[in-house]
Amino acid sequence: MFDATTMGSGVPAAGVSLAKVLPKARFVGCDDIVAVRCAGAADRCRPGDVFVARLTVDGDGHEDIDRAVARGAAAVVAERMVPTHGVPLCIVPDTAWAFARLAHACAGDPARALKVVAVAGTSGKTTTAWLAASVLAEAGLRVGVLSGLGCLDAESTVPEPADLDRPEVLAAWLRRLAVSGCTHAVVEVSSRMLADRALAGITCGTVVATSLATAHLEAHGTQAAYEEITGRMLDSLGPDGCLVFNADDARLRRLARRHAGPSMAVALRRSADVTAVPVERSLHGQTVLVMAAGHTAAVTVVAPTASFVRDSLLAAAIGLRNRVPLERVCRGIEAAGGVPGRLERIDRGQDAAVFVDHAPTGHALAATLSSLRRLTPGRLLLVAEEPVAAAIDPAARFAIRAARWCDETLVVPTTVLDDHADGVAVAAYARLDRLLSHAGAGDCVLVLGRPPAGGGMPGDPDDPGDPAAAGVLATLVDGWLQVAHPSTWGRRAA
C-alpha cells in the first residue's frame, strides 16, 4: 500500500483508501493509495496531493501529469496507462467521477450528515433553491443553501460567493454546513456540475428538475448531450429518493419515466400533485391558490410572472416532501419575498413598473418577457447591459429577438457611467433618459443585469448588499428614478 498522507509537510495522518472509494480502480506500482487531499488541476497541486487527470473544457489532464508530479503530486489517478515518473498510478474508468468522489471522501463525506435537496434545470434553479430554503426554515429546520447567488450555513447571515462548479469547493461547503449544525442542504446544481459528476458519492433525498430547454449547447455540444447530462441527476437519488419535476415540461415528463422511485409532479397547465390557480395577478404581484393532497392554501408574492409561481410550487413540493404542512409552506414562500436579481422590483415612486432581472439564459428571459407582456397594458420596455445581451445572444440579434414581446429594446454599454464616456455611451444614456422619462402608468421597464447596490439578500431585507457586486445599469436606473422622484421616494423610504 502506498500512503500519500506521509508525503509533504503539514498533511494529516488520516486518509482515504482509493481502493475503498473507487471500487473499479486498478493500481500500478502498489495495491492501494491512501490520500488526504486530491487535486483536479496541475496548477492547484500541492506536495502530497493525489492528482486526478480529468478531461475538461480546458484540456486533457493526462497531458499535465509531468507538471503535477513536478509540483509534488504523490500519486496519479488516470483513465489509461501513462508515464508517472515513478509515482504510483491508479487507473479508473471515469476520472471526473473519481475526482468528485475523492473530493467528498477527503472532506469526510459530509453529505451523509445532511438531507440533501439538489435543484437542477435550465432555468429557475436559484429562485427555487432560495424559496425551498425559506419553506424549510419556516418549519424550524436548520437549512444551508449552496447556490450561484451565494452560500449560507446555519450561522451565516450574508451569502458568500463560491465556485461550486469545483467538486472540492462543493465538498468543503457541505462540510461547513454539517459542522454548523445544518440538517438540510439545498444545493443548486448547474449542468457543468452534472457534467463533472460533482454529486458522485452523494445520496440525495430529493432531486428537483425545474425545466429542460434548448440551452448550454456551447458547453455540451448537442441538445441530446445536454439532456443526457441533465438526466444524471437521477443517479444521485437514493432508493427512497424523490424526484420533484415540472410536469408542464414534456422533456421532464420523459425524464421522470426513467425514475422508478417516488416522484412529485408540479404543474400550472395540467393536473399534478401540486398545482395552483390564479386569484389575482398584475404587475404589482399576484395571489394564487396552491393545491396539494386535497388541501388548499393561498399565497401572495411580489413577483408577477408565471415562472415564479412554478418555482414556488417546486419549493412547496420540497416542503411537503419534508412533511411541512401546506399552510406553513405558503408562509415560507411569502416570507422569502423575492430573490435579488430575479425579477426584483425597483420602486422609487415612479408610475411605471420597473424590474431588475439577471436572466442566465435566453430561455429564462423569454419566459419572463412572455409573462410581463401579458400583464402590461401599456408598453413593455427592455434595457439590457451590453455584456448580458451578448452572452444571451452572441449573434447580435438580441434586440430583434426581444421585439417579439417588447415595444422598445435598448442595449447599454458598461462605459455609460465612465467619466470619459465615448460618443456611443453618451448616446445610449440619452436614449435611456428619454425612455425612462416617457415611461408612464401602465408601462413596464425590465432592466436586464445585476441588481443595484442595496438590494439585500433573500430573507434579509435589512442587508445593504455589496456595492462592488452591483450592476452598472441597474444602479444607473435606480439613481435616475431617485433623482426624478425625490419627494415621493423620500416619503416612501421614511
Image: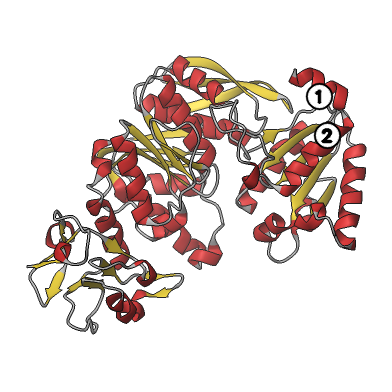
Residue 98 image label? none
Residue 138 seen: yes
Q: Residue placed at 77% from the left, 34% from the top?
A: 354
What residue lies at 49% left-to-right and 22% top-to-bottom?
332
Q: Is residue 123 above or below residue 180?
A: below
Q: How many neighbours does mark 1 have within 10 angstroms: few (below 14), some (14-19), or many (20 or more)? A: some
For the residues marked 2 and 1, what is the alpha-carbon distance in whole angstroms? 9 Å
Kind of residue at disc 1: Trp
| The C terminus: image quadrant | top right
Of the pair 258 and 63, the residue shown nearer to us: 63
The location of residue 337, given as percent across then percent down, is 59, 26
Task: Describe residue 115's horizontal placement relative to residue 465 as left or right.
Answer: left
Residue 112: name its quadrant: top left
Residues 404 and 360: in front is: 360
Q: Nearer the viewer, residue 116 or 309?
A: 116
Is residue 23 left or right of 130 when viewed as pictured?
left
* Vertical order, 140 against 59 (above or below): above
Residue occupying image coordinates x 75% and y 47%: 473
Question: What amino acid is found at the position of numbered circle 2 in the picture?
Answer: Leu
Residue 271 seen anywhere in this rendered image of the structure:
no
Residue at which label 1 appears:
489
Q: What number of labels is visible?
A: 2
Say whether marks 2 and 1 touch (CB < 8 Å). yes
User: Does 328 appear above or below 362?
Assistant: above
Please tell me the numbered disc located at residue 481.
2
